[in-house]
Amino acid sequence: MFDWPEPFVLRALVASLVLAIVAAPLGCIVLWRRMAYVGETLAQSSLLGVAFGLALNLDLTLSVILAAVVAALILIWFGQQKLLALDSVLGLMHHAALAMGVIAITLLKGPSIDLMGFLFGDVFAVTNDDLVWVLVGGGLVLAVMVALWRPLVRVSLHEDLATAEGIDPRFVRGAFDILLAVTIAVAMKIVGILLVMAFLIVPSVAARPLASTPERMAVIAAIVAMLGVFGGLYASLMVDVPGGPSIVLAMSALAVMSLLAARRRSG
Amino acid sequence: MSSEMPRGPLVDAAAAGPVTGNYVTGDHGHTVGCGCGHAHAAPIDHDALISARGLWFTRQSRDVIAGIDLDVHPREIVTLIGPNGAGKTTLVKLMLGIERADRGEIYKPSTTVIGYVPQRFDIERAIPMTVGRFLALGHAVADGDIRRVLSDVGAQRTEHQQLAQLSGGETQRVLIARALLRRPNLLVLDEPARGVDYVGEADLYDLIGRLRDERGLGVLLVSHDLHVVMAKSDRVLCINGHVCCSGQPSAVAQHSEYARLFGPRAAGALAVYTHHHDHQHDLSGAPHPVESAGSGASHDGQGA
């Protein structure tokens, strides 16, 4: 006999599945453009958003989104100047943002606040308000991704060719950075700052050997991500381990299987 | 979605109207230690598919491009040669509007449609991509068009293969096919024969020559070789920041050593370009006049 799951489980499942679908095409682009480090920096900067939200008594999701978008704008600006290599900027911002965020949150709320929840996510604490953020924010990101998909693929495949054919790569790259920031900020609730990039990238890694076109890779990544969500949440409820890390672990297991299968096939 | 206007200094005739002499004529720097001897400050050529005058491009206080004029006319094949770092690819990027010149002017009539064939080594291989999908990406094409253009370039068997798994010559043909789908009248190719053996190179030049003959395309081609170029080149420009020398290539058959080296099959499509420099470059790349003219061109370590 099938038991209808508890509401908190249902909320966790819906939020994770929606984000799994939204994150899949973004993960593909991040993989192709080798932007994992950019994503990590955006994620760690968003912890500062938590601090600002606590200090100014704002909605935490909103302030995290704002912090991530500001971080993205800073990276876009640094990417257009030639004085400093982007990698130097990332190396500086990356851990400095995390350190500042941890210190700011501790100072503001004392050590009693649940830092672990921000760092590794708390998927079973997703509220109805969070769900609205996920559905509205995720829907918006997905809609813009669909509109930007072809220029993004073309710029990723060969930037000079795309530019010569009339695409403005700075616009496409900038728009993608902002989409990535919003997605990371919203997904942080589920898998936390430290695992959010794995949530984006690992399904694409699994999809790469199975796909023949960019569109198929995005769809397969979404399917892998959803399987990871089901497997991770199920294991988390059965064995009583944290949800976010379980989802990422399930996705990683699928990716390893996919890569091993591809290796066997190619001899 | 994204701007369809080309970036950079391209003057679009439709948008800006005919350009008449609003470019610098007196001080575009050619006179500084140039020694190339040809007349400067010629007006923009309005009959050309694309016409550039006095282009300068400076990065990290080095003049990558120092006062280059360049025209490509309909049905004309112009080959660019020059040592590594001479600015060949930069010049192509300026002509395409990918980079913006610091000085100078490029005139492109609104009727000119450029088909760009980039260096194949820069294609991102992490993206799964069939040849068919690549050709259809970003513009509306019918299935029949894709098969037709692939057979036009001699790559009909590749349609369902992965782009990343093609051979060098096949990748180059597919890139040419994509450029042709834009129905260009000017084809710009950046080192199409790099990393391809002489037979493959001759085949590619046969293809490019056939496209010129059949479709009346103008061709701007960057060659990776300083001495061996496409035999059908109407003009060869040797550049090293500025134009060092220019002229017509002569048939490989006149040079028995080359003919023996390449074999009879390749000899028809390849030609030898003999440099006639009246100056040399020092280590910083700055040109200096040479007293004994005709002593032969010296190029950074690449003797014929």
Image: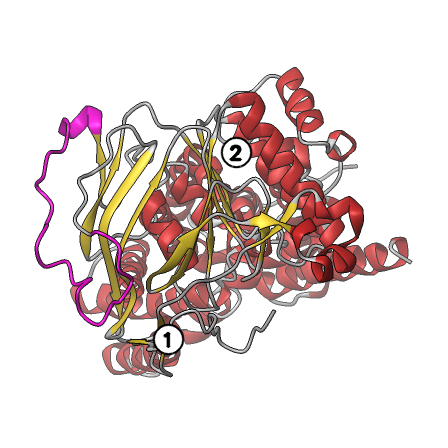
Residue at image coords 31%, 64%:
A79
Residue A14's tag is none
Position of residue A265 relative to residue B97, above or below, is: below
The reply, left or right, for residue B43 in relation to residue B133 is left
Residue at image coords 21%, 28%:
B13
Where is mark 1, residue-wise?
Answer: B280
Q: Secondary structure at mark 2?
A: helix
**The C terminus of chain A: image quadrant:** bottom right
Front disc: 1 or 2: 1
Residue B103 x/y as whole percent: 17, 55
Image mark 1: chain: B
Between residues A260 and B265, which one lies in front from this camera angle?
B265
Q: Secondary structure at mark 1?
A: strand
Q: Earlier in the sequence, mark 1 or mark 2?
A: 2
Q: Is residue A206 visible?
A: yes
Residue at image coords 22%, 45%:
B9
Image mark 2: chain: B
Where is mark 2, residue-wise?
Answer: B179
Position of residue B44 relative to residue A182, above or below, is: above
The CA span between labels 1 and 2 is 37 Å
Q: Amino acid at mark 1?
A: Gln
Range of residues picked out in magenta = B13-39
How many discs mark residues in the rendered view? Answer: 2
Between residues A84 and A56, which one lies in front from this camera angle?
A84
Residue A169 x/y as whole percent: 36, 47
Position of residue B286 relative to residue A258, above or below, is: below
